[in-house]
Image: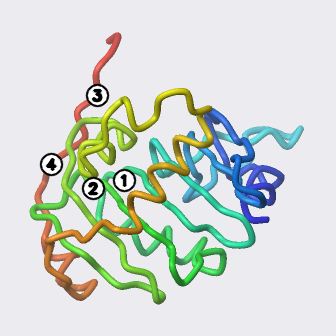
Amino acid sequence: MPLERFKAEGLLFNTNFLTATSEAGMTAYRGELVLIEGGVADAKGHTKPPVEVLRGAVLLGGEKIELLIGAVDEVTSLTTLADKYSDDFSPHMKAVLYVVNLKEPVQVALDGVTFVLIPLVQGVPWNEIIDELALEKSDFKGQPAADKVLTVYRELQAYQPKYPMVALEAALANTTDAKREAWGAV
């Protein structure tokens, strides 16, 4: 199972939860997914924090990853993500990425999977996907955290984004100089 392997390889970072769902063989994850690992920090083998992560990652999988949601700073991170993880993608995987430097929302097919790319300078991918799918609090009432991910996945099965399908090159050219807005203590 990819999610357990990712955990063993240290590719899950700032984990919120990694839990089995009520559907047999399916595991849900929320946290961050490492795209580029940090180097070795010292002679004892401690590692530095990751260089790049998929922020606010929401993953669901069994034998393969069936759902992938998260945020990246640049459209180019899509190729980094695909290069690292595409062997673990289900051909039917639902993928929605929120991208800081994206100008207009688009869809891109990469390694047989359609990625919905939506601009987002600030926000939380989990909240944004709930808004995108027009889900309500009542849709999640009484569900444990892992089953809430399953609910989003099931809703995505019928989701038909109105965004144009473009080539990866067009998506890479569809950018701005926007930077992620951070909040918190200075």
In the rendered image, the quadrant that contains the C terminus is top left
Which residue in the protein does label 1 denote?
72
Label 1 amino acid?
Val
Q: Determine whether label 3 and label 1 are within 8 Å by CB.
A: no
Whole-angstrom CA distance, mark 4 to mark 3, is 12 Å
- Residue 4 in percent (x, y) is at 80, 55
Which residue in the protein does label 4 denote?
178
Viewer-nearest of discs 3 and 2: 2
Which residue in the protein does label 2 denote?
99
Residue at (23, 85) in percent of width and height: 169
**Residue at the right extreme of this rendering:** 44
Which residue in the protein does label 3 denote?
182
Q: Determine whether label 4 and label 1 are within 8 Å by CB.
A: no
Q: Quadrant of residue 24?
A: bottom right
Q: Is residue 59 left or right of residue 77?
A: right
Whole-angstrom CA distance, mark 2 to mark 1, is 5 Å
Q: Is residue 128 above or below residue 35?
A: above
Residue at (49, 49) in percent of width and height: 151
Label 4 amino acid?
Ala
Whole-angstrom CA distance, mark 2 to mark 4, is 10 Å
Neighbor class of circle 3 (other Cα within 10 Å; few <14, some 14-19, many 20+) is: few
* Circle 2: element type: strand
Q: Quadrant of residue 84?
A: bottom right
Q: Which mark is residue 87?
A: none
